[in-house]
Structures are given as structure tokens and as C-alpha cells.
């Protein structure tokens, strides 16, 4: 999920090129703000999902059912096992500019749920509460059962934006609990860096004129 800040690409480039100290100071403050959200999300990760004990990672390699039948087929990774350590490790943030999405937007500062299993906990049931129609399970109610057990352990979705996709159980919940403090801190860090940069360059111009 992206922290919404627009019109800053050129500002970041100017700071990085002409005022690297201010750029580093700004990034340090932004990291602190984003880390507060990702750290809270990590505290929400449960040791297991009640009713899905067979999903727990027991350290045994898993082979995709489809890949076992077609071992040379690409992109058939097995469904990830539940591992709280993997989930926590994947809850992080980034200050790197993202690629443009289909709408032409980029994110400069992002909160990330990078693990596959973490993304499952975050969004399971958000699109299909009754489960995926293309599921390989022999039980037609397996998807609904899976989603219900996750929700029973983690609670329902928490809305953290205006889009139907802006809701989840980990990062979205932590971001909503943060009540905008992280985004305000990001804006404050940027504005402070901009002000210091403009003041410094103005003084430099005055000094040269004198």
C-alpha cells in the first residue's frame, strides 16, 4: 500500500543531487514513520491459525499438486505454509520509487507485505469469500472454510482507504490504527527538507550576489 504523496519526484531528485545531507535526514524521518506502522503489523501476527493446524509450516518441503503432475511446468509454486516468522519478516516498507501502474501513478513511499503467506492473511476472502472457483481442492467448501478460519483468528478486514481494495488484516489494520500519523510525519519530513533546501539555496544566492 502506498503512502499518498504527489509531486515529489523532482524534489527528491534535487535533494539527492544538491543536498544529500537533507535527503538523508528526510529519509531517516520517513523510515521512522513507516517503521512504526510495519512494527505494529508484526505484533498482530499470530503463532497459528485456529482450525487450520494442517496449514502450519512444520519444516517439510511442499510440492505443488499441479507441479507434481507436470514437473516442468513454470509458475506452479506450492501453496505456502503458515509461518509467522516469514510473515513478520515480509512486513516492511520501501522508500524506492515503484514502477508506474496502469493508471500512470508511482509510489515513492510504500508499506509492503512481501511474503505470499502474509498476503494471504492480509486479503483472504476479500475478493471471493466462498473461495476460488478454480481451486484444486476436492472439498468445494474448502475456500470458505479457509477464509472463515483466518477471520476467526485475525478478525475482519479493516478499511484504510477509499477503494474496496484498501482493506486488510495486517498492514491495512496497522495503518488505520495509526490514524494518519505516519502520513502526516512523511509530509512533515518532506516539507522540512524542502524549506531547509530553499533557505540554503536562497542564502547561497545572496552570498554570491554580495
Image (tube, rainbow, N blue to C red):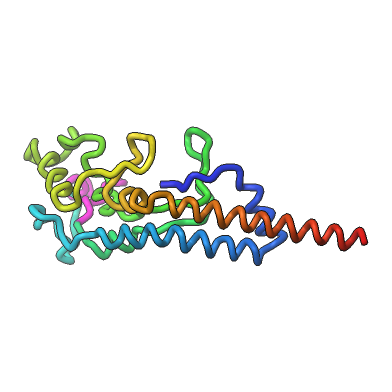
Residue at the farthest right position: 210
In this rendering, does residue 106 appear at all? yes
In this rendering, does residue 72 appear at all? no
Figure quadrant of residue 22: bottom right
Q: Which span of residues is magenta-colored? A: 65-81
Asked if the magenta segment contains residue 79, the reply would be: yes
Image location (x, y in percent) of residue 81: 19, 56
Asked if the magenta segment contains residue 70, the reply would be: yes
Q: Residue at x 42, y 49 (%)?
A: 180
Q: Toward the viewer: 87 or 34?
A: 34
Looking at the image, is 19 positioned above or below residue 187?
below
Q: Residue at x 70, y 58 (%)?
A: 197
Image location (x, y in percent) of residue 156: 21, 44
Q: Quadrant of the C terminus?
A: bottom right
The number of numbered badges drawn on the structure is 0
Q: Toward the viewer: 190 or 171?
A: 190
User: Residue 130 vs residue 194: left or right?
Assistant: left
Image location (x, y in percent) of residue 49: 14, 55
Instruction: Give the dominant element type of the magenta stretch: helix, strand or loop.
Output: loop
Q: Toward the viewer: 192 or 147?
A: 192
Q: Residue at x 61, y 53 (%)?
A: 191
Looking at the image, is 26 positioned above or below residue 4?
below
Q: Toward the viewer: 136 or 47?
A: 47
User: Residue 21 vs residue 209: left or right?
Assistant: left
Q: Residue at x 81, y 60 (%)?
A: 203
User: Residue 30 vs residue 134: left or right?
Assistant: right
Amino acid at each position: 500500500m502506498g503512502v499518498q504523496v504527489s509531486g515529489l519526484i523532482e524534489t527528491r531528485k534535487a535533494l539527492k543531487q544538491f543536498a544529500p545531507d537533507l535527503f538523508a535526514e528526510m529519509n531517516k524521518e520517513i523510515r521512522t514513520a513507516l517503521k512504526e506502522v510495519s512494527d505494529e503489523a508484526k505484533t498482530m501476527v499470530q503463532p497459528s491459525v485456529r482450525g487450520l493446524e494442517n496449514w502450519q509450516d512444520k519444516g517439510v518441503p511442499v510440492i505443488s499438486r499441479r507441479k507434481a503432475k507436470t514437473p516442468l511446468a513454470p509458475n506452479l509454486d506450492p501453496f505456502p505454509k503458515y509461518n509467522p516468522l516469514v510473515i513478520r519478516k515480509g512486513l516492511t516498507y520501501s522508500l524506492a520509487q515503484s514502477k508506474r501502474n496502469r493508471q500512470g501513478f508511482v509510489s515513492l513511499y510504500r508499506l509492503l507485505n512481501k511474503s505470499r503467506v502474509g498476503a494471504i492473511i492480509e486479503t483472504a476472502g476479500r475478493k471471493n469469500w466462498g473461495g476460488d472457483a478454480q481451486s484444486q481442492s476436492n472439498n468445494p467448501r474448502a475456500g470458505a472454510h479457509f477464509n472463515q478460519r483466518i477471520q476467526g483468528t485475525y478478525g475482519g478486514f479493516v478499511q484504510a482507504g477509499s477503494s474496496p481494495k484498501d482493506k486488510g488484516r495486517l498492514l491495512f489494520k496497522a495503518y488505520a490504527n495509526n490514524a494518519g500519523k505516519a502520513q502526516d510525519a512523511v509530509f512533515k519530513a518532506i516539507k522540512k527538507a524542502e524549506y531547509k533546501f530553499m533557505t540554503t539555496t536562497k542564502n547561497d544566492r545572496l552570498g554570491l550576489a554580495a
